[in-house]
Structures are given as structure tokens and as C-alpha cells.
Image (cartoon, coloured by chain):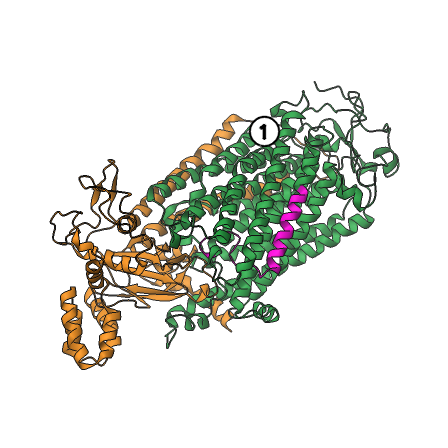
Chain colours: A green, B orange
């Protein structure tokens, strides 16, 4: 910080700035305008530019996955053929159900592999991790760029899979369905699986980079328990990334070998075991759920403390609960398989361990609430999204309880109850934290403010739309609506094996209930769509004509707020001396900056 | 129109449920979104579900009320306002909000496991149903009766049921899901998965496939009919078995029902062949798997080394073998269920029963269709006292 006597960091000294901003408050040369041209971006080693490129990539993926979601919900607005039939006819599919199956597969695969997993750690993690450490870049900048290109490669293979006949296996690629030569989308599986394999490597290398950075680049005065909680979250995430993702890689290679080479690892007709595939797959994909949620929790810890202008409550408990979740996350994969016929002992053990995850999750939520208590809470977009995170994560977490208890899970497994649960945890959790992060770090990343009022309107539509879309799915799921069903109409029953002359009265009330719930859900999804459209408008407008932001509009004390907005290429001229990241006493409000400035006569904290 | 009906249904279920015999319990179930309750499994797991939902509502309201209250009470009223307190830790509080959740989730775990254990263990005197799933239909066979490969599930009320689910060779994974019974079991190709429950309420309920299986996943549907008494159920099973033999004279059909072994089947076949070859063909198709298994066991040469009457021979006897605990030459133990018996047919030297010599039996891996293995397993199961 320029104005603290201990550490001058920015290239220009900062006396009081009487008028708006840039010249004094922020350096004229920053990472965005330092060099120009697309080539300078494609070959950049700057973690901030790589973070921004990831941000663009994951937003594009989220958009594509979102288009699929809206198409799915439109199809499900009423039972029977709808928009899926229109698309299917245009693509020359024989059956509209095949079109639907491809749509939900693409929705899941795009959202999980291209958006949720890299979303917060690769985009925001890349941007803030080195700055929070007071470093110039991550430990291995070249590897960082390579990870990004691997991510792009994975994305290209996914698109190739669509071109080569589509994909209808679900994002889980369960065998023997995914290795069945009779399936309608035989051509798409290998490219898609290879795409997921590349994305896995991108994730592993990012994890390696983050762990190395936190170990090697942490300033001497920043002990482990002086790190911002975002770094604890990213560190825990990176552990999962490097330990679990290789298993996914091996599994996917085996799947490709099985499919291309006709060997029988998973195929029961060749002596293989399809349940083995599920074990391998969930050994990665359950910890992956925590790759999705842990960085989100890191964001929420930062945002709630900064926006409440109050020291985070229970720092070490939040940090350790991240690690606990990361480690417990490795031991619970079997709870995805309670109905698969695995041994009863395994079911009991997996259920038992699963319940322990409730404790660190509860610890986090209560500590966030305690942080808000007696704070000075700034009710602006980042805080609204962070509080929305607590709302949806609470519902998502609590509805995990009947899924972790074996006897109740047997009924709920593979129904819309599960669909609602994991959307609350993954979409709710990750998306709301992603949006909190986007609004919180936006002024830092781009040096611009966004309009607060339309941004809150967007929040309202997204939050309400989300809850309307997914809450009702709990109800129809508990009533027995299975997931991945293209149809639930009376006509579907008439087309089934017992359909000839069937008296359908036993199913009618159920069909009507499903119909109402699906309609409500679809209407909710349109609400979310409106919200995201407003949000896009707000952010694009901010980029084009936003008011310049000062270096620290929120008055936060993690190191990224000590450098200018946007930060210069090397972040800091000299290495800053970090103090307690949640001690806000060094910053006072300065109306002319619409933000905070460091207190002049402040003594060094150490 | 449908939507309006549906809304009415949604609104009417609650009062309708209160009026029914189970009263408050049923109301709670409806409020928490559970369908009709028609098995002991549903009775065992529903209270836990209702408890968890109640608990969740309590914690959710607690969290949200605190959050909204803090957000309003401590909101920043003017720019630059500072927090009232900077309190940053309290071990007492941490314990206060860690321990109760731990205790509560452990209770939920134990109750959930207990409910599951009843489903995972067979009771005595069960009725058995063999379920075969394939793209995209279900077929239900009733061992010990003449009804095979029926598209619907028929069960008596109050009698424990043992459902064995499997998917056809070279097919994909399906999952048998009956919401009214709160049961679900994956049908995996060539694997025998067991499910136990007792229907407690007569009526007709939907059956779904719950594991995504391709194009017609959403029409892989059937229904289960629960009959008030075992006699009514037996009659329904017989009527259903009669359907393919509509024109067969009653006394011949009675003979068909009584067939219990290969010898009786051969006699019957000769009799109907003399009348019409079409019936002979039909009989060949609809034959009980255990009888077919007996014929296959002979033709594959199994009976040269195994006996059906309890006598020791080159290989262990098949009499009372099913679900018997076996000890192997390496000292390990396993129960002789379908999965073990199938493995022993395909790769007999993997697990050799103690006191028997290894290498005596040829491997049948790749030499016998899954359908025939299933029939031989039915035969072994039928060899019980």
C-alpha cells in the first residue's frame, strides 16, 4: 500500500485525490492495457489475463449450458413431445426422446465439466490467488497458460462430440450404456470422454500450480493461519484436484479402451463389472462436488466479512472445516450407489461417513452468521449473492440428510428430489458464489463500477427464479417422478408394455401433479433467464461506460485491494507486508473515491 | 385444463388424507410430499423422512431468520459506518453449534440404517418374483407358479416378498422403482440383486424405471397390483397364466399348472402335441424355469457329478444348496446365492468348496447363455425340502 508507511507498492505516490479517480488512485498502465492485440493475450503468462480468459470461457460455457437448460425446461413445460420434437425433426432424429436425452446430457456435461468445476478456482482463483499472496504471479506461469489451453482443447472435443453424432449417455457416462455399440450416439462418446480427460488434466495442473504457489510464494510474515480464507478454500480444492482427478483420467481411458478395443473391464457380457465403473467414477465425481463448493465457500467467507466490515468469526474453524470437507469427501463416494446392489456393509459405512460432512458445513454457516452479527453490513450485490448462497446452500445441505440416510434414500434416489438437491448445492452454491465473486471482484478486475440498482433487479429475478424452478422439484421427486424422463403423460403409459387397453385411472392424479410441478418449474427457469439477461446488460454496460473504481471500494484488507484497480502487470512494485486480512481498521471511507483509503498515520501492525 | 386439475389434486390431497384412517401421520406425509404408503418399507422409512424434513425446516428457519435479522438490524446506514464489534472467535460457540448437529445426524444415520436392514434381509416364507429388465420393458416371473414373463407385478397383501432383479445379458442397467413401496433396486446385466418387503395395502400402483436406459426410458413403465388375500393373488396369477392357453381344455390346463419336474413336462408335451403342435410350442416357451433348468442340467452334463437328492458325488449336491453357507479350500466363506452359483458355473475353480478337489469341473465361461444359467439356478433353488 502506497499510503502506509511500511510499504510503498504502487508506482505513483498517492496523495489525497480530490476529483474522481484514475491518475492518482490507479496506475494508468495496468494488466489490461499494458500490451495490446489478441496475440498478446494468447501468449500471456499473466495470471490475471489467464483468469480473465478462463472467465470468458466459463461464461460462454455457462451460456451454452443455460441455453440447453431453457430448452429442456421448455420441453418439460407440458408432457409429451414439444420443443425437443421440433429440434429433433430439424436434426433428422427418429425419436424426439433421443433429442431430449442428448439435450440433458449436453446440459449436464457442459455445466459440470466446463463451467462449475473450473468456474471459481480457475477464473477467480487464478486472478486473486497470487495477489492475495502478494506475489507477482503463480509459481508456474507457463504451466498455467498450458492448463488454459488444455481446457480449451477439452471444450473443442466436447463440441466435436456433438458434431460426431451427439451424446446421450448422461454426463456420468455409465457403462454398459456408454459402451453399447447399439446406442444411437456411438460416435460421440469417445471424443466427449477424451474431452473430459483433457479437462481433468487442466484441473490437475491448476491444482499443482496453486499448491506450489501457496507453499512457495507466501510471504514470510503470512503464516498459514494468516492467509485469507479464500486461499484455504483454494488449497483444499487443489488437494482434491490432484488426488481425485487422476482416477477420473484412468477411468475415462479405460472406458475409451473398452469402447475402441472391445476389452471387458466394465462390460458384464465380457466378464467385466459395470458397478466397478460407478465406483471409479464416483471416487472422482463425489470429491468433485467439493471442488465445486469449497471455492464457493471461500468466496462467501471473503465477501461476508468484507461487506460486514467485521473480522471473520471462527477463522481457524472455517479454514479447518474446508480441509475436513476435502478429506471426508474422499470417503463417501458409495452413497451414490445405495441401490446398485453393492454390499449392505458398504452402504452402512458410506452412509455413516457421509453424515460427518454435515458438521463442517454447519460450522461454516454458523460462523458466517456470527460474522454478520454486530457488523456494518453493506447491502449491495455481492452481499445479496452471498446471503443467497447461505439460503440455497442451507436448503441443499439439509435435503442431503434424507439422501444420506439409507432407508429414505432408496425411495428418493434417481428422482427429481435428487435433481433439486444437487441443483441447490451445485448451481445454487456455485452459481450464487460465482456471482458474488463476479460482483465483488469486478471493480478490481476491470477497474469499473456497475450500476447497483439494475444489478439488484437481476439478483431478484435470479434468486426468485432459482427457488421457483427447483423447490417444486423436491415435491414431485418425493412423489416419485424419476429423473431423466422425457415424458410423464398418460400417453407415455399407453405406449408402455402394459398400455394396451390400460385403465389409466391409477396414474392420473400423479400425472396431473407432475404436470403442475413441471409447469411451475419451467416458469421459474424463465425468471432466471430474465435475471441473467439483465445481469449481462449491467456488466456489459459497466465495461463500456462504467464509472472508474478506486482501488478499494469495499474497504477490504486482503492484498488484492492494496494494489490499483485494475492491478498493474506485476501487481506490486515491492512485496507488500500483509497483516491480518480481516482487520479493517487500516481503511477509512473516502466519499470522493466512493471507496476506502488507507489511514495515514497508521502504525505498522507487526 | 390438466394443470388446473393438478392444482386441485395438490390442494385436495391434504384434506383427503386427514379424512383417511391414518389421520395426522398421513397428513404429515402428504405435506412432506410422499405418495401413498403401501409397504412395510414405506412405514419404516416415512417417519424418518418426516422427521428429517421437520428438522430441516427448523434449522432453515433458524438460519434465515438470523441472517435476515442481522442483515436488517446491522445494515450500514451511512457510508463509512464501522462495525459495532470485532469479536472474532469463541470456542464455546463453535462447540455449541458443532455438537448438536453431530448428535442429530448420528441418530438419523442409525434410524436410516435400521430401516434399510429390514429391506436387506429375507424373512421366512416369502413369495419370490424374478424380474428381468431389458430395453425397454419389465418381465415378472413367479417361480413355483405357471406364470412366466408377465408384464405386470402381482402381489398379495401381508405376505413378505422377495424380488430378485436382473437385467438381460448385453443390455444396460435399469432400476425397478415402486414409489408406493419406497423400494428401488438396480437391474444390472447378469447380476442378481435382491429386494425384500411386505405389501401392506391393496390397490394398483405405478412401477417406473429409475436408471436412465436410453430412448424409451420414460415409457419403461408397468404397474403392481396388490390383492387383499393370498388366495385372490393365487387366482389372479392362475388367470394370467391361463391367457396364453385360452383354448386349452380345462383339465389339460390343470395338468399344466401341476407340472413340477421334467418328467411331468414330457408327458404333458406328448399329450398336447397329439392335439395341436401350436400348444406344444407354447408349452415349450412358457415352461417353468426350474423345469427347464432340470432338463438343461442333464443335457449340459451337470448331473454326472452333482446330485439332486443330497448324496455326495464328485461335486457338491444341489439339494438345499441355495443360500447355504459354504467354506472354501482357502478357508474363506460365502453364502451360495445366485451370484456365487453363477460364478461357480462360469469359473468353477475360483472358489472350490473345502473337501472337494479343484480342476474337476470344466469352465463354462462363454459356453452357456445367461438365460440357461438363470434356468439352472431356478432348478437349484427348487431343490429345497
Could you say whether the residue bearing mark 1 is in a helix, strand or loop?
helix
Whether residue A445 appears in this view of the structure is: yes
How many marks overall?
Answer: 1
Compare residues A280 and A426 and report the one nearer the observer.
A280
Looking at the rendering, the stretch of residues picked out in magenta corresponds to A148-177
Compare residues A389 and A247 and report the one nearer the observer.
A247
The reply, left or right, for residue A264 in relation to residue B322 is right
Give how far across and how far down residue A538 sits, in percent.
75, 52
Mark 1 crowd level (few <14, some 14–19, many ≥20, 10 Å Cα): many
Give how far across and how far down residue A466 sits, in percent.
59, 54
Whether residue A460 appears in this view of the structure is: no
In the image, what residue occupies the spot 57% across and 30% down? A319
Quarter the N terminus of chain A occupies:
top right
Quadrant housing residue B299: bottom left
> Is residue A152 positioned above or below A553 on the image?
below
Give how far across and how far down residue B378 sits, in percent.
23, 58
The reply, left or right, for residue A554 in relation to residue B384 is right
> Is residue B215 positioned above or below A23 on the image?
below
Quarter the C terminus of chain A occupies:
top right
Give how far across and how far down residue B210 sits, in percent.
42, 58
Chain containing the residue with disc 1: A
Q: Which residue is labeled 1 in the image?
A: A315
Compare residues A21 and B306 and report the one nearer the observer.
B306
Residue A152 located within the stretch drawn in magenta? yes
Residue A544 located within the stretch drawn in magenta? no
Amino acid at each position: 500500500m502506497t499510503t502506509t508507511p511500511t510499504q510503498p507498492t504502487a508506482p505513483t505516490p498517492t496523495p489525497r485525490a480530490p476529483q474522481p479517480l484514475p491518475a492518482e488512485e490507479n496506475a494508468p498502465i495496468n494488466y489490461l492495457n499494458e500490451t495490446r492485440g489478441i496475440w498478446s493475450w494468447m501468449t500471456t503468462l499473466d495470471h490475471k489475463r489467464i483468469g480473465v480468459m478462463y472467465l470468458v470461457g466459463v461464461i460462454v460455457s455457462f451460456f451454452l449450458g443455460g441455453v440447453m437448460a431453457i430448452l429442456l425446461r421448455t420441453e418439460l413445460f407440458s408432457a409429451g413431445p414439444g420443443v425437443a420434437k421440433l429440434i429433433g425433426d430439424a436434426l433428422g432424429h427418429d425419436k424426439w426422446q433421443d433429442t431430449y436425452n442428448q439435450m440433458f446430457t449436453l446440459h449436464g456435461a457442459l455445466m459440470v465439466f466446463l463451467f462449475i468445476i473450473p468456474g471459481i478456482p480457475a477464473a477467480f482463483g487464478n486472478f486473486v490467488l497470487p495477489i492475495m499472496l502478494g506475489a507477482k504471479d503463480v509459481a508456474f506461469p507457463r504451466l498455467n497458460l498450458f492448463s488454459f489451453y488444455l481446457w480449451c482443447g477439452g471444450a473443442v472435443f466436447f463440441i466435436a462430440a456433438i458434431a460426431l453424432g451427439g451424446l446421450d449417455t448422461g454426463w456420468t457416462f455409465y457403462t454398459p450404456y456408454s459402451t453399447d455399440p447399439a446406442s444411437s450416439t456411438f460416435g460421440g462418446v469417445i471424443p466427449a470422454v477424451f474431452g473430459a480427460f483433457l479437462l481433468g488434466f487442466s484441473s490437475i495442473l491448476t491444482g499443482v500450480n496453486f499448491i506450489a504457489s501457496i507453499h512457495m510464494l507466501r510471504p514470510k510474515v503470512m503464516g498459514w493461519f494468516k492467509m485469507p480464507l479464500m486461499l484455504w478454500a483454494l488449497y483444499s480444492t487443489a488437494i482434491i484436484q490432484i488426488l481425485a482427478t487422476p482416477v477420473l483420467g484412468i477411468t475415462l481411458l479405460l472406458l475409451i479402451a473398452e469402447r475402441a478395443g472391445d476389452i471387458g473391464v466394465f462390460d458384464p457380457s465380457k466378464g467385466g463389472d459395470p458397478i466397478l465403473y460407478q465406483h471409479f467414477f464416483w471416487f472422482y465425481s463425489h470429491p468433485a462436488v467439493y471442488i465445486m463448493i469449497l471455492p464457493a465457500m471461500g468466496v462467501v467467507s471473503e465477501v461476508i466479512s468484507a461487506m460486514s466490515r467485521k473480522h471473520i468469526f471462527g477463522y481457524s474453524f472455517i479454514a479447518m472445516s474446508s480441509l475436513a470437507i476435502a478429506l471426508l469427501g474422499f470417503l463417501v463416494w458409495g452413497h451414490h450407489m445405495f441401490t446398485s446392489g453393492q454390499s449392505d456393509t458398504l452402504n452402512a459405512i458410506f452412509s455413516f461417513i457421509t453424515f460427518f460432512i454435515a458438521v463442517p458445513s454447519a460450522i461454516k454457516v454458523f460462523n458466517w452468521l456470527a460474522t454478520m452479527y454486530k457488523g456494518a453490513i453493506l447491502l449491495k450485490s455481492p452481499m445479496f449473492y452471498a446471503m443467497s448462497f447461505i439460503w440455497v446452500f442451507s436448503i441443499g445441505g439439509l435435503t442431503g440428510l434424507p439422501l444420506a440416510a439409507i432407508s429414505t434414500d432408496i425411495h428418493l434416489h434417481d428422482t427429481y428430489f435428487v435433481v433439486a438437491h444437487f441443483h441447490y448445492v451445485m448451481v445454487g452454491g456455485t452459481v450464487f458464489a460465482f456471482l458474488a465473486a463476479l460482483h465483488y471482484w469486478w471493480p478490481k478486475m476491470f477497474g469499473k463500477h456497475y450500476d447497483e440498482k439494475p444489478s439488484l433487479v437481476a439478483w431478484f429475478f435470479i434468486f426468485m427464479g432459482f427457488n421457483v424452478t427447483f423447490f417444486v422439484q423436491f415435491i414431485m421427486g418425493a412423489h416419485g417422478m424419476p429423473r431423466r424422463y422425457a415424458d410423464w403423460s398418460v400417453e407415455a403409459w399407453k405406449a408402455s408394455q402394459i398400455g394396451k387397453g390400460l385403465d389409466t385411472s391409477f396414474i392420473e392424479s400423479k400425472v396431473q401433479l407432475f404436470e403442475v410441478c413441471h409447469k411451475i418449474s419451467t416458469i421459474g427457469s424463465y425468471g432466471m433467464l430474465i435475471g441473467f439477461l439483465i445481469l449481462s446488460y449491467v456488466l456489459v454496460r459497466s465495461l463500456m461506460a462504467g464509472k472508474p473504481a478506486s482501488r478499494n471500494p469495499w474497504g477490504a484488507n486482503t492484498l488484492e485491494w492494496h494494489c490499483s484497480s485494475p492491478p498493474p502487470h506485476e501487481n506490486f512494485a515491492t512485496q507488500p507486508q500483509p497483516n491480518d486480512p480481516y482487520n479493517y481498521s487500516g481503511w477509512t471511507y473516502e466519499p470522493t473515491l466512493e471507496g476506502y483509503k488507507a489511514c495515514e498515520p497508521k502504525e505498522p501492525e507487526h | 385444463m390438466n394443470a388446473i386439475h393438478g392444482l386441485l389434486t395438490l390442494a385436495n390431497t391434504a384434506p383427503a388424507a386427514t379424512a383417511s384412517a391414518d389421520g395426522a401421520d398421513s397428513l404429515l406425509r402428504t405435506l412432506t410430499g410422499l405418495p401413498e404408503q403401501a409397504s412395510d418399507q414405506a412405514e419404516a422409512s416415512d417417519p424418518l423422512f418426516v422427521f428429517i424434513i421437520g428438522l430441516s425446516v427448523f434449522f432453515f428457519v433458524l438460519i434465515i431468520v438470523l441472517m435476515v435479522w442481522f442483515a436488517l438490524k446491522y445494515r450500514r446506514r451511512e457510508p463509512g459506518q464501522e462495525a459495532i464489534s470485532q469479536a472474532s472467535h469463541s470456542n464455546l460457540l463453535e462447540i455449541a453449534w458443532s455438537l448438536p448437529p453431530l448428535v442429530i445426524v448420528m441418530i438419523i444415520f442409525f434410524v436410516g440404517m435400521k430401516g434399510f436392514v429390514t429391506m436387506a434381509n429375507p424373512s421366512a416364507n416369502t413369495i419370490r418374483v424374478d424380474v428381468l429388465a431389458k430395453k425397454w420393458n419389465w418381465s415378472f416371473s413367479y417361480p413355483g407358479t405357471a406364470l412366466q414373463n408377465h408384464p405386470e407385478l402381482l402381489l398379495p397383501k401381508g405376505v413378505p416378498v422377495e424380488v430378485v432383479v436382473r437385467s438381460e445379458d448385453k443390455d444396460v442397467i435399469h432400476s425397478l422403482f415402486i414409489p408406493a413401496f419406497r423400494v428401488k433396486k438396480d437391474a444390472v446385466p447378469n447380476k442378481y440383486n435382491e429386494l425384500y418387503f411386505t405389501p401392506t395395502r391393496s390397490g394398483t400402483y405405478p412401477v417406473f424405471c429409475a436408471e436412465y436406459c436410453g430412448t424409451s426410458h420414460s415409457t419403461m413403465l408397468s404397474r403392481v397390483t396388490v390383492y387383499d388375500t393370498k388366495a385372490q393373488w393365487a387366482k389372479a396369477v392362475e388367470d394370467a397364466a391361463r391367457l396364453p392357453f385360452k383354448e386349452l381344455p380345462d383339465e389339460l390346463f390343470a395338468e399344466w399348472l401341476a407340472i413340477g419336474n421334467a418328467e411331468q413336462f414330457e408327458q404333458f408335451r406328448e399329450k398336447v402335441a397329439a392335439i395341436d403342435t401350436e400348444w406344444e410350442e407354447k408349452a415349450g416357451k412358457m415352461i417353468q424355469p426350474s423345469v427347464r433348468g432340470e432338463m438343461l442340467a442333464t443335457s449340459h452334463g451337470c448331473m454326472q457329478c452333482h446330485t439332486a437328492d443330497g448324496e455326495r458325488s464328485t461335486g457338491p449336491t444341489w439339494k438345499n444348496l441355495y443360500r447355504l453357507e459354504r467354506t472354501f479350500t482357502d478357508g474363506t466363506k460365502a453364502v451360495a446365492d445366485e451370484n456365487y452359483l453363477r460364478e461357480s458355473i462360469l469359473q468353477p475353480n475360483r472358489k472350490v468348496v473345502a473337501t472337494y478337489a479343484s480342476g474337476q469341473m470344466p469352465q463354462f465361461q462363454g459356453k452357456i447363455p445367461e438365460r440357461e444359467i438363470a434356468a439352472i439356478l431356478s432348478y437349484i433353488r427348487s431343490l429345497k425340502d
